[in-house]
Amino acid sequence: MHIHVETCGSGQPLLFLGGSSWDLRFDRVAFDWAPHAGVTTFDQRGLGQTDTPNAAWTMADYVADAARVMAGYDRFDVVGYSFGSMVAQHLAAK
């Protein structure tokens, strides 16, 4: 599955997870952090330029997507908004 990811800035990795209707068009706030952190954000499944799988999605799928996007980092900070905060909590517990 293709996940559309955008990054900017440098420093401590920072993942932004938006709400259930949030795609990269709304990530100006996330990118305002670029002078302070290495910002990563992505369109969650079914939104924006990320693929829309046919099967039913579970929280585990959303968490796996976020983990895949941040693969290669030993540590990173996470900011979640609305539904993204639930994904962030499950990701942190993993």
Image: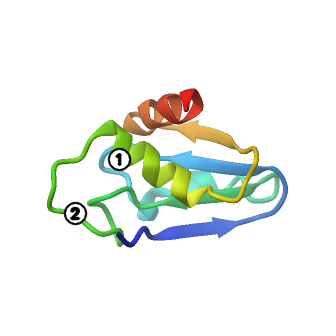
From the viewer's perspective, is residue 35 above or below residue 94? below
Residue 23 in the image: above or below residue 51: above
Q: How many marks?
A: 2
Residue positioned 59% across, 39% down in the render: 79
The answer to whether residue 18 shows anywhere in this view is: no
Residue lying at 62% horizontally and 40% vertically, measured from the top left: 78
State the SS at label 2.
Answer: loop
Which of marks 1 and 2 precedes in the sequence? 2
Q: Is residue 94 left or right of residue 24?
A: right
- Tell me the amino acid under the disc marked 1: Asp
Of the pair 23 and 40, the residue shown nearer to us: 40
Residue 44 visible from this viewpoint = yes
Image quarter (top left, top right, bottom left or bottom right) of the C terminus: top right
Q: Position of residue 41 (x, y in %)?
A: 55, 58
Above or below 56: residue 91: above
Disc 2 and disc 1 in contact, CB within 8 angstroms: yes
Query: Which residue is labeled 1 in the image?
Result: 61
Give whichever of 29, 52 is nearer the camera. 52
Q: Classify mark 1: residues with Cα within 10 Å, few (<14), some (14-19) or many (20+).
A: few
The residue that appears at 43% across and 64% down in the rendered structure is: 25
Distance between mark 2 and mark 1 Cα atoms: 11 Å
Screen quadrant of the N terminus: bottom left
Residue 25 badge:
none
**Residue at position x 30%, y 61% in the image:** 47
Give residue 23's position: percent from left, percent from top.
39, 59
Amino acid type, label 2: Pro
Residue 91 position within the rendered picture, expressed as x and y whole percent measured from the top left:
53, 36
Q: Nearer the viewer, residue 4 or 9?
A: 4
State the residue position of label 2. 53
Q: Position of residue 13 (x, y in %)?
A: 74, 52
User: In the picture provided, is 57 more to the left or to the right than 62?
Assistant: left
